[in-house]
Image (tube, helix red, strand yellow):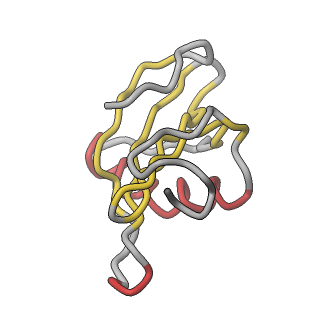
Amino acid sequence: MSASGRLMGGWSDTKPATAEIQAIADKVKAQLEEKENKKYPTFKATEYKSQVVAGTNYFIKVQVEDDDFVHIRVFRSLPHENKPLALTRYQTHKTKQDELTYF
């Protein structure tokens, strides 16, 4: 078990986004904009789930327009690996009601 009491590989519950989660989303925004060839003037993290693996996967719901959301998966490696945050996958054209699921 990890220090938080969750099993390795287990999911957290969906939680409201925090300042830390917004900072993670902001750090990978340029990667998403490059992949989509699109600029997102709004990029507001609204909720997230996390998964502890050999590092942490963050699944973050991001509001990009009034009722247009993007789900992003961001991998944060273990601290000793000293690697940047990586946008590993994403899903576009989501709504506020769409549940964050593994992708």
Question: Looking at the picture, how far across and down is residue 35, in whole percent?
Answer: 26, 46
Which residue is at 39% across, 87% downward? Answer: 80
Q: Which of these two is toward me, 99 or 70?
A: 99
> In which quadrant of the rendered view does residue 4 lie?
bottom right
Question: Looking at the picture, how far across and down is residue 41, in whole percent?
Answer: 58, 44
Which residue is at 39% across, 64% downward? Answer: 55
Question: Looking at the picture, how far across and down is residue 23, in whole percent?
Answer: 62, 62
Relative vertical location of residue 95 with respect to residue 85 in this rendering, above or below: above
> In which quadrant of the rendered view does residue 13 lie?
top right
Q: Where is the C terminus found, in terms of image quarters?
A: top left
Which residue is at 43% across, 25% downward? Answer: 101
Q: How many marks?
A: 0
Question: Looking at the picture, how far across and down is residue 70, in whole percent?
Answer: 47, 31
Relative vertical location of residue 99 with respect to residue 34 in this rendering, above or below: above
Which residue is at 40% across, 74% downward? Answer: 78
Q: Is residue 93 left or right of residue 47?
A: left
Farthest residue in the front direction?
Answer: 1
Q: Is residue 79 left or right of residue 2?
A: left
